[in-house]
Amino acid sequence: MSTENPRPGGVTAVAITLWVSGALNVITGVLLLFQTGNEDLVQRIGGGGPLIVFAVAIAILGAVTLIVAGGLFGGSYGARVVATVFQCLSIVAAIVLSITAPWLLWLAVISILLSITALVLLYLRRSNAFFRN
C-alpha cells in the first residue's frame, strides 16, 4: 500500500467488523467445546459429536475471518474476494433463518442490511483503487 493511496474508511470499517466477528466466533467455538456436559444443549444439537464438530467449525470460521480481516487492512485482493463470499453466504443464511425461524425475521433483516453495506463499502471507487495497488 502506498502513501498516495491510503486505506478508505469503508474498508477499515468492514475490516474492523470482520475482526470483531472472527474473534467472537473463536470465543464462541471454544466456549461451546466446554458445553459437552450440558445435556439439554447436546440433545438439541443431536449428540456430543455434532456439538464438537459444530464448535470446531465455528472456531475455524472465526480464525479464517480474522485472517481475512488482516488481509483487508493490508489491501489484499484475495481477502476482499473471501470477504465478499462470506457476506454473500451470510445473506443466504439470513434468508434461510427468516424462513425457518420467522420470529427472528428482524435479526435476518439486520444481517442482510449489514452484509449489503459491507459489500457496497468493499466495492466503492476508492475501495477498488485501494485493492488494485
Image (spheres, rainbow, N blue to C red):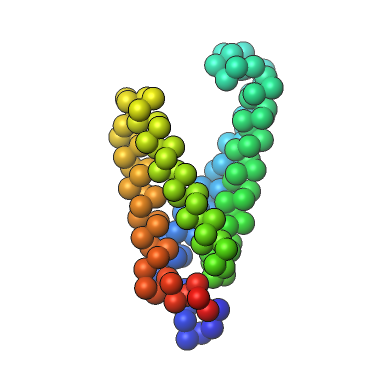
Number of marks? 0
Q: Is residue 65 above or below residue 51?
A: below
Q: Is residue 13 above or below residue 6?
A: above
Q: Position of residue 87 (x, y in %)?
A: 45, 50
Question: For residue 38, what is the image quadrant?
Answer: top right
Does residue 10 appear in the picture of this structure?
Answer: no
Residue drawn at the location 30% of the way across and 34% of the way down: 106
Does residue 125 appear in the picture of this structure?
Answer: yes
Residue drawn at the location 45% of the way across and 43% of the way down: 90
Residue drawn at the location 63% of the way across and 32% of the way down: 55
Q: Residue furthest bottom?
A: 4
Taking the image as shown, residue 70 lies to the left or right of residue 86, namely right
Taking the image as shown, residue 46 lies to the left or right of residue 118, namely right
Residue drawn at the location 39% of the way across and 50% of the way down: 115
Q: Nearer the viewer, residue 53 or 29?
A: 53
Identify the image quadrant of the N terminus: bottom right
Q: Position of residue 32 (x, y in %)?
A: 62, 29
Taking the image as shown, residue 57 lies to the left or right of residue 16, namely right
Question: For residue 9, what is the image quadrant?
Answer: bottom left
Q: Position of residue 111 (x, y in %)?
A: 37, 43
